[in-house]
Structures are given as structure tokens and as C-alpha cells.
Image: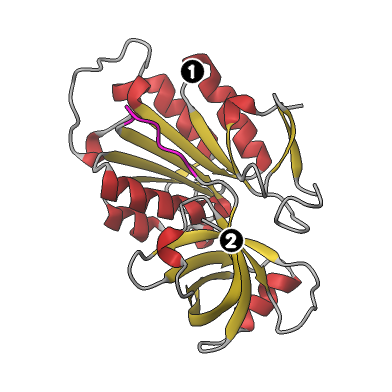
Amino acid sequence: MQKLQTKAEILINKEIAPGHFKMALCIEGFAGKARPGQFLHIRAGAGYEPLLRRPISVHRISDRQDIVELLYKVNGKGTQLMSRRSKGTFLDVIGPLGNGFKVPKGQSNFVLIAGGMGVAPLVALADRLATYRKKAITVIIGAKDAASVVCVKEFQEIGAKVIVVTEDGSRGDRGLATAMLEKIIGDFDIRKASLRAGPRSVSDVTIGDYAPEVGLYACGPMGMLASVAKIVKPYKIKTQGSFEERMGCGVGACFGCAIKTQRGYERVCKEGPVFDLADIVWD
């Protein structure tokens, strides 16, 4: 879809957890055409302060009402300004930008792993997977503590099995999301797993049951994505990761968000933010 620069009306902007906000925008002729994994580039204030826009992932997409939901965490001046914008006011937005997640044919069971605010685009992906594939979805949510865990209910309502991992153990298992992924893979030697068991209920599905049919999707900090790439490499699991990088222009002009891939440097805002993790050069 050709990207648009337009005014988006704020329908909802509320704090759902300490420092975490959910915003719903009405953008005429826009929402139903955005894809999971894409993002909006938003002018946070009413004027040009701050100068740079903020890239915010598409969190949920309405096909009928031109409504896009965003999930963001206040961690700087731009997001602080966004958190103060009220219902009925308008934001200047450009989007949808970037390339979103792809779902190759043959995949029927999906594992999504999120670190921190990495949950934001994965809810839109889970929505799409549940709607069009109607197969099993397992979600691993990693967070610093219980207060930082968001979107569990949203994933459960979609029909996904949700595993929560917190660094301090205040909710779910204690540790890192990547350690949980490693444990799941280790529990089931996917190279020997039966591929003919047939799908069971969502809550029973594990990655080991259907290895070649598994689509693994990750979003979170660079360190987490690097760990995921290392974990899955021996099993040759196709894994797409959505990168969170600071951006200048957001449209591929400034190269401020470039990362090193097997094809050379590529821009997170233009060629990404979703990449095959096997294509990334992890220095």
C-alpha cells in the first residue's frame, strides 16, 4: 500500500499498566490495509518539538472501521507527549511503513516470543494467524517484572497459549523468554518429532510437535533477537524477527537505522523492521 501522511483522530489513549499506553486512532482509508509488523511514524507533539517522529508498531488492525491500535511505553519526551494527547485531538502520522511479517505456506503452528514491548506487533500477527490459519499459537512473553507484563488477556482471547516469564519471578516463570524458548525446544527433539500427530487443542501444542511446520516470530531488544537466532540455528527453524531501532526519517533516506545483513547493510525502517534472523550478521 502506498504510504500516507495524514491526520489521525485519537479515539482512545489510556494507561493500561504503569507507563504503558494503548491508543486507538481513526485513519480514514488506512487501517484495513496495514499489515502486522508495519509501523506508523508519528509526530508526537502538536508542533515540531520534538523534531523527529516516533516509530510505533501497529498493535491491532480493524478491517472495517479504519481503526488502528497502538501500544507504547513512555520512555522519553516523544512518548511522554503522546501520553498527554487526549481523545478527539489529531496526530500527524505517516504509514503504514516497513515490511511486515510473512507467513510461508506449509506453516500451521506458530510460536511468538516477545521481549518487553515486543508484544505490541505480535498481537496483530496473532490476530491475523488466528483469523486466516486457525491453527495453534503459543506465545512467550518476557518482561522485567509483573508490572511490565501486558497483553496476556489479548493473546488468550485470540486463542493462544501464553507463557509468561519475568526476570524477577514476580509473575510466571523466573528468567528470560529466550531461556523458556530454549527449554521448550530442548524438551522436544524436533528433529525426531512426529509430524503426523495432527493438531490438538491450542493449550496442548508445543514447538516440538510440529517442527518443520512451525513459524517462529520474535520481537524485542537486539540482544534477545540475537539469542533467539543462536537457539534456533541448529534446528533450522525459519524465524522472523522484528527489530526495534531508533529512526531518523523512517522512510529510508537517512540510513540511521541500518543493520548488517548477509546482503550488506539494510534499513530497519525500509527493508525491515522484520527480517529473517538467519540473514542478520551478529557481530
Q: Position of residue 210 (x, y in %)?
A: 30, 23
Name the amino acid type tagged 1. Lys
Q: Which mark, by number, is residue 236?
A: 1
Q: Pointer 2: what residue?
A: 3
In screen coordinates, is 210 left or right of 48? left
Q: Quadrant of residue 78?
A: bottom right
The image shows residue 18, relative to residue 95, as above or below, that is below
> CA separation, marks 1 and 2?
34 Å
Circle 1: element type? loop
Q: Residues within 10 Å of mark 1 (few under 14, many from 20)?
A: few
Drawn side of residue 107 relative to residue 282, left or right: left
Q: Is residue 17 above or below residue 196?
A: below
Residue range corresponding to the magenta coloring: 101-107
- Seen from the viewer's position, the closer of residues 283 and 62 is 62
Name the residue at 19% across, 30% down: 199
Closer to the camera in the image, 217 or 193: 217
**Earlier along the polypeptide chain: callout 1 or callout 2?**
2
Check the image and report above or below for 60 versus 216.
below
Give the amino acid type for the residue marked by disc 2 in the picture: Lys
Camera-nearest label, 1 or 2: 2
Please give left or right for residue 12 compared with residue 77 in the image: left
Q: Is residue 105 magenta?
A: yes
